[in-house]
Amino acid sequence: MNVRINSEWKEKLAPVWESASFANTAEIVRREYASRTIFPPANQIFAAFDLCPFSKVKVVILGQDPYHGEGQANGLAFSVAPGVAIPPSLLNMYKEIHDDLGTPVPTSGDLTRWAEQGVLLLNNSLTVRAHEAASHSNIGWEYVTDAAIKALSEGRTGLVFLLWGSHARRKADLIDRSRHLVLEAPHPSPLSAHRGFFGCRHFSKTNQYLASRGETEILW
C-alpha cells in the first residue's frame, strides 16, 4: 500500500509505514478491498489523519472500528457520511453535548467539522468488512493507531484524550498523564451510556482545559 496521508503524519509514523508489520496489514487490506465490500471507501482510510495533522491535534477521541453498514463510514470515529442517519452512539454524544453545553442537537452525523478544529477521531481499526463488526480488528491496524497515540503523547503537550468504554480505556497506558488530560467514561452506546457517560461533562471539561492553556475551544 502506497501510504497517501497527511505529510506530518507520514513523517511522524515513518517507522510504522516502513515496517514488515504494516506491509503485512497493507497486503491483507488490498486483498480484502479486491474481493469483498470493505468500509470506509479506500480513499478515506486515513481521513482522520488527513483532516487533523499532527501539529493541529487538540483532542483525541478513540473509537473501535468503522461502521459496517452501507454508506455510513467516512474514516472518522463515530462519524457518518453526510445524509446518513445518526447512529445511536453519536446521538447519545449529541445529547450529552446538549445537556453539558446547551447547544442544539445537530441534524448531521458528519464530524468533519470537529476534525478540522483539531479533534482526531481515531478508530483502533481503520477498516471493516460490510456487516461484520470488528472483522479487521486482528489484522494489525492497532500497530498504526497505537503508534499515533504514543507519538502524540510524547511529541505534544496539553492534549485531551477522551477514552470511552473498556476498549478505549485500555489505551490509557500509552498516554503520559503528566503532559495531557485523560478523561474516561463508559461508552456512549445505548447499552452503557446510562452507566456514566451521560453526565460526564467531558465536552465542557475539554474546553475548560483548552481555554486554560490559551487554546481555542472546540465548537462541538
Image: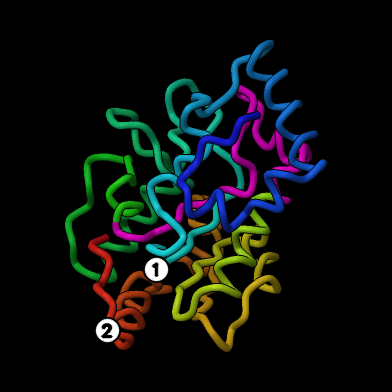
Q: Does the magenta stretch include residue 125?
A: yes
The image quadrant of residue 19 is top right
Where is residue 37? Give x, y as percent. Answer: 60, 16
Residue 191 shows in this picture? no
Secondary structure under badge 2? loop
Which quadrant does the N terminus fall into? top right
Residue at (32% x, 45% y) in the render: 112
Q: Mark 1 points at which residue?
A: 58
Residue 171 shows in this picture? yes
Question: How many numbered markers are drawn?
Answer: 2
Left or right, 140 with respect to 85, comes to: right
Q: Name the residue under label 2.
A: 214
Picture layout, residue 220 above or below residue 213: above
Residue at (32% x, 54% y) in the render: 114
Secondary structure under badge 1? loop
Please name the colour scheme applied to the rendered image: rainbow
N-term mark: 2 or 1: 1
Where is residue 64? Give x, y as percent. Answer: 61, 48
Chain part drawn in magenta: 117-143
Tell me the number on the disc at residue 180: none
Picture layout, residue 48 above or below residue 146: above
Where is residue 154? Give x, y as percent. Answer: 60, 75
Q: What residue type is labelled 1?
A: Lys
Work out whether residue 200 or residue 51 is closer to the camera in this orientation and state it.
Answer: 51
The image quadrant of residue 72 is top left
